[in-house]
Image (tube, rainbow, N blue to C red):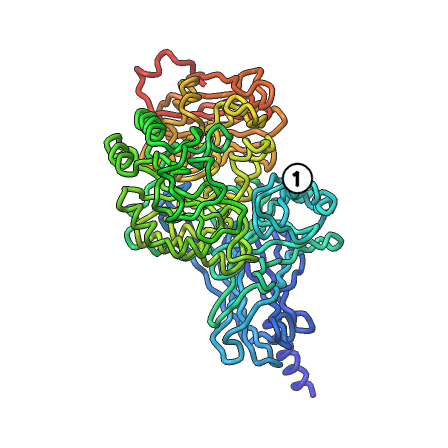
């Protein structure tokens, strides 16, 4: 009797060890607990330094037209644990190497009733958690449709959130800061007008979602490696404070069509008691596969200008003529049409921009509105809207090609698809071949409007696959992609580094559409940029848009110094000087920072950070000794205090500080700035005021003693 009792206790102990698993991060700060509830539902919990940050949360997926959902009645067949530590070199990035260090737990689940198997793979880093579902090859789960993903993120309280409305078609909203319990009441105001939008819930929000607890813990919820799957939103139960994954549906309401073996994207939880750690986290990249481009030497970061802002503000037009209410490509005779005299993409105007870009050392020039079809490009559900190769009569492709080449400026192509996805795929090869024949090695794509095929959404599985198809096809032609209106990035640029930038958020263009919130750029690095760089298009020096277009009373809610700082704080290997050349000519001393600032980095140091309030970052240029610092500020004026201990000891530098003037204000006095030079070294300190909607930028150039002798020392 006694021996049988001992054997039974031993059996229960083994069973208990299988039913509950614990995983620690390499530094021990994070602890993951996985278990099965009594009904076989898989759940997890995440603790940070002894505090729970994600309460016990359910896991699983529901299947369409299936009796057994993959949400319960599981048993654990076995588990595996691994440790992994590598350092890899990105093609471009915020640093020249990235450490990928985690402990991994793989839980093999068996659902006896359906005889189906599912794995959940957890990777616990020092700064957060990644996990995904995997479906091994099996006869009982070959082709299947996920109707809902039931992943939960159970919060421990009514946290402060920085959120935008959940939407199947746009991320171009201003961020709202509120308690979780306040989302429902603020949702109607948060959903502002857009040319394509489809919100789904009064408590639905988008990732990357930034949260802060009452006791100062920062939590970021997102996903990584979004491939062959719909984008994930989060739907909040505002009574229990539990977020549940909410996948973007297709036209029929289905979510993900799957084939085993297969897997979902990673779900990510970044955690720290210091906001700077959220900005420095590389979890999203580390959960993606390594670079698949064998020789990426053709992928080059670029600083560019564009024939763009004058159209955005309404000063000029994309279309060539006002004669046609409708256009049929190949039939409409543009040669016989009367030009409207507002068309921006003329040979003469483009040459003017090329001259300015060349004189000031810019790598490239983007031109929009060069190709036929802009007269009826939007709002007509038109399939054959552009052919991507036929120029307007006033844009000479050959002449522009040779002129740009003579000025050492590389032209950047523009492919607006008007969201006609099928049409773009039909023309991709021809369009890319045209680009290569005319020395265009980068393209800005656009997906404005409702998706064609009709009823599809911008972030559903089929459209996500289209973005990936265009990206991989571009890699075959050695073309870099800057995708606008596409799905927000999830670290895929590690695998396909020709994805050199995305828009996928509310960018500078909205400053000409009524304006962005003054603190918008203090939130984006904590949200949108978690997945990859943004083509934010900074560098606006004239804030009064009515000076460009008397019919547009918008105002750029930023000081000029803030615009300079964005080149450091809004990381991108593709950076635009977005304003008109004539505006830069009015402020050439400030424009010098845009000319000097690097676009690729060896090292990044996060000096100050608080979402919604301020961010200060220092970055060291790639393969050089110069540093650049950017500070952006929210609506409350503050004194920024930074140390220069990131500089190499024993060396002297010239620091040129481009700062808000004493009376600067984003609305009342945005162009008030001052420039000062100092002698600095690794022991220097700076106390600098940042105005409302303001900030400062610093270039730090290595110098010898003769250059710094007469400068004030910090």
Q: Name the residue under label 1.
A: 177
Residue appearing at x 56%, y 15% in the figure: 662
Residue appearing at x 38%, y 21% in the figure: 654
| Relative horizontal placement of residue 706, taking residue 132 as reference (left or right) | left
Q: What x and y, as percent, mark residue 325?
A: 50, 41
Position of the N terminus, as image quadrant, is: bottom right
* Residue 540 visible in this rendered orientation of the protein: yes
Task: Pick whichever, 96 or 538, lies toward us.
Answer: 538
| Relative horizontal placement of residue 441, taking residue 525 as reference (left or right) | left
Q: How many marks?
A: 1
Mark 1 surroundings: few (<14), some (14-19) or many (≥20) residues within 10 A: some
Task: Pick whichever, 569 or 617, lies toward us.
Answer: 569
Q: What x and y, as percent, mark residue 665?
A: 59, 21
Q: Residue furthest right?
A: 239
Position of the C terminus, as image quadrant, is: top left
Which of the 4 image quarters holds residue 366? top left
Residue appearing at x 49%, y 56% in the figure: 464
Image height check: is 420 above or below 629? Answer: below
Q: Is mark 1 on a helix, strand or loop?
A: strand
Image height check: is 271 above or below 561? Answer: below
Task: Pick whichever, 155 or 247, lies toward us.
Answer: 247
Which of the 4 image quarters holds residue 144? bottom right
Image height check: is 680 above or below 17? Answer: above
Task: Pick whichever, 365 or 455, lies toward us.
Answer: 455
């Amino acid at each position: 009797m006694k021996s049988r009792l001992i054997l039974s206790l031993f059996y229960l102990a083994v069973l208990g060890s299988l039913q509950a698993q614990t995983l620690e991060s390499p530094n021990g700060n994070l602890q993951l607990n996985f278990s099965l509830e009594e009904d076989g539902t898989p759940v997890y919990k995440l603790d940070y330094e002894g505090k729970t940050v994600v309460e016990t949360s359910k896991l699983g997926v529901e299947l369409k037209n299936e009796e057994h959902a993959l949400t319960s009645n599981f048993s654990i067949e076995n588990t595996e644990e691994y440790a992994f530590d590598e350092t890899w070199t990105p093609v471009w990035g915020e640093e020249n190497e990235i450490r990928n260090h985690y402990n991994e737990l793989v839980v093999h689940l068996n659902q006896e009733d359906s005889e189906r198997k599912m794995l959940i793979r957890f990777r616990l880093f020092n700064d957060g958690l990644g996990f995904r579902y995997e479906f091994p090859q099996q006869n009982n789960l070959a082709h299947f449709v996920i109707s809902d993903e039931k992943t939960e993120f159970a919060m421990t309280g009514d946290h402060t959130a920085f959120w935008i409305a959940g939407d199947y078609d746009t991320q171009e909203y201003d961020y709202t800061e509120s308690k979780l319990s306040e989302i429902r009441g603020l949702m109607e105001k948060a959903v502002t007008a857009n040319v394509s939008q489809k919100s789904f819930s009064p408590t639905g929000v988008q990732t990357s979602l930034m949260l802060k607890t009452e006791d100062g813990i920062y939590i970021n919820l997102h996903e990584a490696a979004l491939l062959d799957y719909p984008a994930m939103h989060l739907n909040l139960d505002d009574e229990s404070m539990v977020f549940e994954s909410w996948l973007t549906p297709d036209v029929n309401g289905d979510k993900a069509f799957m084939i085993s073996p297969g897997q979902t994207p990673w779900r990510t939880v970044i955690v720290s008691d210091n906001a700077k750690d959220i900005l420095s986290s590389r979890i999203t990249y580390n959960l993606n596969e390594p670079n698949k481009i064998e020789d990426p030497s053709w992928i080059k970061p670029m600083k560019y200008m564009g024939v763009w802002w004058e159209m955005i503000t309404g000063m000029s037009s994309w279309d060539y003529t006002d004669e046609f209410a409708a256009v049929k490509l190949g039939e409409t005779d543009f040669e016989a049409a009367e030009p409207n005299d507002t068309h921006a993409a003329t040979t003469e105007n483009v040459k003017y921009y090329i001259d300015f870009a060349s004189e000031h050392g810019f790598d490239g020039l983007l031109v929009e509105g060069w190709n036929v079809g802009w007269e009826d490009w939007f709002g007509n559900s038109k399939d054959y809207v552009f052919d991507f190769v036929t120029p307007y009569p006033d844009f000479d492709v050959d002449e522009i090609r040779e002129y740009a080449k003579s000025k050492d400026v590389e032209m950047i192509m523009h492919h607006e698809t008007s969201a006609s996805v099928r049409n773009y795929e039909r023309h991709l090869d021809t369009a890319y071949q045209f680009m290569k024949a005319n020395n265009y090695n980068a393209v800005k794509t656009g997906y404005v409007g409702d998706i064609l095929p009709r009823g599809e959404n911008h972030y559903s599985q089929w459209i996500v696959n289209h973005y990936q198809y265009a990206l991989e096809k571009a890699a075959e032609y050695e073309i870099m992609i800057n995708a606008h209106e596409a799905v927000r990035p999830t670290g895929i640029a590690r695998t396909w580094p020709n994805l050199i930038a995305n828009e996928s958020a509310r960018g500078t263009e909205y400053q000409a559409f009524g304006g962005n919130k003054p603190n918008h750029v203090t939130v984006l690095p904590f949200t949108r940029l978690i997945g990859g760089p943004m083509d934010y298009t900074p560098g606006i020096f004239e804030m009064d848009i009515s000076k460009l277009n008397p019919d547009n009373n918008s105002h750029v809610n930023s000081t000029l110094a803030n615009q300079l700082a964005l080149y450091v704080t809004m990381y991108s290997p593709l950076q635009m000087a977005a304003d008109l050349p004539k505006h830069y000519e009015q402020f050439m001393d400030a424009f010098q920072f845009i000319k000097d600032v690097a676009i690729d980095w060896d090292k990044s140091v996060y000096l100050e950070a608080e979402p919604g309030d301020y961010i200060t970052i220092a970055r060291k240029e790639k393969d050089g000794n110069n540093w650049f610092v950017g500070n952006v500020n929210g609506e409350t004026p503050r004194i920024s205090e930074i140390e220069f201990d990131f500089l190499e000891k024993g060396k002297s530098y010239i620091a040129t500080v481009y700062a808000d003037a004493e009376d600067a204000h984003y609305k009342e006095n945005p162009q008030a700035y001052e420039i000062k030079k100092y002698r600095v070294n690794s022991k220097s300190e700076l106390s600098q005021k940042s105005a409302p909607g303001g900030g400062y930028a610093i270039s730090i150039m290595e110098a010898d003693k003769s250059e710094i002798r007469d400068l004030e020392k910090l």
